[in-house]
Image (cartoon, helix red, strand yellow):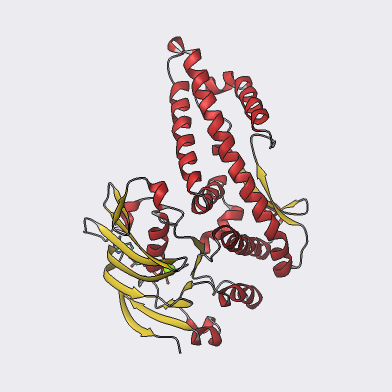
Amino acid sequence: MYIKDICLTNFRNYDTLSLTFHKGINIIYGENAQGKTNLLESIYVLALTKSHRSFIDKTLIKENSEKSKIIGNVILQDIPTKFEIILTPTKKQLHIDSNVIKNTGDYLSNINIVIFYPDDLELVKGSPNVRRRFLNVELTQLNALYYNVMNDYNRLLKMRNDYLKTDMHKFNEYYFTALTTYFVEKAILLLKMRKKFIDKLNSYISDIFFHIASLEDFHIKYDSFLDYDSNDEKMKKKFEEQLSSMREKEIRYKTTLIGPHRDDFSFYIGDMPLKSFGSQGQQRMAVLSLKLSEIEIFKSYKKESPILLLDDVFSELDDYKKNNLLNYIKEDIQTIITTTDLSCIDELIIKQSKRIEIENGTIKNIGEVK
Ligand SMILES: Nc1ncnc2c1ncn2[C@@H]1O[C@H](COP(=O)(O)OP(=O)(O)OP(=O)(O)O)[C@@H](O)[C@H]1O
Ligand SMILES: [Mg+2]
């Protein structure tokens, strides 16, 4: 798939912007704080309805404006499809081909994005929240169903937590058991989808990591509240037993203490957890391998390449890792790169790229592919 063009109104530091992309490589360059990342972010938001770097939608709207609009034409399986998002501080309107999309789940998983950005190292070093968010975002892109299951799960989790906070004299055992049954059902569904995704990542990541880092047995381990079992009923039963054995503790803490909302995953080389033992370089290579594996998963599930967004990553990668990444870019995958320094990108790549210079939220120069 590829994005053909984008049109922004009052997005971040852009008043209006209209830009056509190349099907291959696009390089957005310019000085610091001119709007390069903002432009990349607009593509991410168009695909995922949320930003990768801000949880608060309001920050996306241009200062002193009431709403912001992103329109993009994306070619999906050779068919042009128009996506549109209108953001106000309190709500979001989604359109596909001018039809209003009420359920966000129906909008997501159409445009697929793989993004590299400087904070990615947090996937290895950061808190479990960062990794859970990664799983949720990636699985939502792959499978529209995941988003709905995740929302159901979160809703039931909140109901359960709220109920654990109620006055114990009013506690209704039947209600709580019924709530827990629904909660367990959604938890197992989430767990299964995550497990399948991690297995799929593992089927690619070891070879990719070996190719980049020359180290064997690199893999990801999903750290769960529950041991995986292919038999759903057994898993449900086990989870229910665990919950009931924790009942007193849950009541004391007034919250649900186990479930996919507390799960995590970690990277290992053999038995060595990368988070505590890996060098900075190894951690970077792990993230690179993770993202390259993701591209493979998209290709295998969606039968076409995702759009690759590279925010300021070339200055941080050494030549060897850069080349590994470039090998992917050279293939049939639309890539949008931001950089302050064109000289850190291979001359050959520059020649094959559309170059867009950004200055203070406007296009200063455009260089078409030579
Ligand atoms: N909601 C907003 N309204 C107006 N301006 C904003 C808004 N959000 C961010 N900006 C401005 O956008 C600019 C930053 O843009 P961006 O992050 O895209 O920079 P960049 O070109 O990627 O720079 P760098 O090379 O440093 O990464 C800043 O000047 C910031 O003040
Ligand atoms: Mg930037």
Residue 21 visible = yes
Q: Say if 297 sits above or below 3 in the image.
A: above
Left or right relative to 368: residue 97: left
The residue at the point 47 percent across, 65 percent down is 77
Indicate the position of residue 209 as horizontal and vertical percent values.
70, 64
Return the residue found at the far top.
Answer: 169
Return the residue found at the far bottom.
Answer: 370
The residue at the point 49 percent across, 35 percent down is 153
Q: Nearer the viewer, residue 124 or 93?
A: 93
Q: Quadrant of ligand 1?
A: bottom left
Could you say which quadrant of the image residue 52 lies in? Answer: bottom left
Residue 361 visible = no
Q: Say if 19 sits above or below 271 in the image.
A: below
Indicate the position of residue 246 as horizontal and vertical percent values.
61, 22
Indicate the position of residue 345 as horizontal and vertical percent values.
53, 81
Indicate the position of residue 94 as horizontal and vertical percent values.
32, 53
Q: Say if 181 sits above or below 286 in the image.
A: above
The residue at the point 39 percent across, 52 percent down is 107
